[in-house]
């Protein structure tokens, strides 16, 4: 009898310790709604900023862009396209710079950069300048970036100059 009571007691404890499971899809949707509101409020507060929303395969994204200088040439971008850029990265809400290229102009393969850059950079050509405002899911997502002093789920603002393009 004691064994049955002990098993019953342990079962009750185990079941009461269970809580609702982690739902990453629901969490991502919630964060997407928060990010989209932050961006919409920012754009509404800055009406002179004529930002366009990037569509990817006909689906609206959480990436907005403003072309400051279109650049010249007709470039075909692929995931293997090599780009050399000058950039400044800011937290959208505070304007605080968290990363910039300074005098060093890094080169990347387009397939290895942030999703926001993959969607925005092909909007310009060599010599072009673009501003990209990105929801967290298109930038660093739900991950803290301690080396950049950037908290998780940060909406970011990039200013990018496309210095060179190589296919």
Image (tube, rainbow, N blue to C red):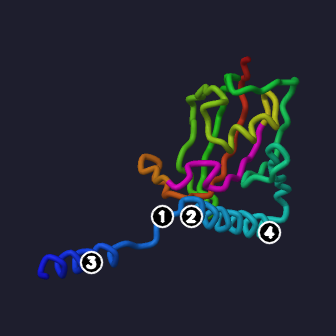
Per the model, the C-alpha gap separating discs 2 and 1 is: 9 Å
Q: CA distance from mark 3 to mark 4?
A: 52 Å
Task: Tell which circle, 2 or 1, labels the residue nearer the N-terminal end.
Answer: 1
- Are dots 2 and 1 in contact, CB under 8 Å? yes
What residue is pinned by disc 4? 44
Q: Nearer the viewer, mark 3 or mark 2?
A: 3
Q: Position of residue 24 (x, y in %)?
A: 54, 59
In the image, the segment drawn in magenta is: 129-142
- The residue singled out by tag 2 in the image is 27
* Mark closest to the chain's N terminus, 3 or 4: 3
Q: How much space separates mark 1 and mark 3, taking CA atoms?
A: 20 Å
**SS label for mark 4:** helix
Nearer-N-terminus badge (1/3): 3
**Residue 166: image x %, image y %?**
72, 18
Indicate left or right for 14 with 52 as reference: left
Query: Is 130 within the magenta?
Result: yes
């Amino acid at each position: 009898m004691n064994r049955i009571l002990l098993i019953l007691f342990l079962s009750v404890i185990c079941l009461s310790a269970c809580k609702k499971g982690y739902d990453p899809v629901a969490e991502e949707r919630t964060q997407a709604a928060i990010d989209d509101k932050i961006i919409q409020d920012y754009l509404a507060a800055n009406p002179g900023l004529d930002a366009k929303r990037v569509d990817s395969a006909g689906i609206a994204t959480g990436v907005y862009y403003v072309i400051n200088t279109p650049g010249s040439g007709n470039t075909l971008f692929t995931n293997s396209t090599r780009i050399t850029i000058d950039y400044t990265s800011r937290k959208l809400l505070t304007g605080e710079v968290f990363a910039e290229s300074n005098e060093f102009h890094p080169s990347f393969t387009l397939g290895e950069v942030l999703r926001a850059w993959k969607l925005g950079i092909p909007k310009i050509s060599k010599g072009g300048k673009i501003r990209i405002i990105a929801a967290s899911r298109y930038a660093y997502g739900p991950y803290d970036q301690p080396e950049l002093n950037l908290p998780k789920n940060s909406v970011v603002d990039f200013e990018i100059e496309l210095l060179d393009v190589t296919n």
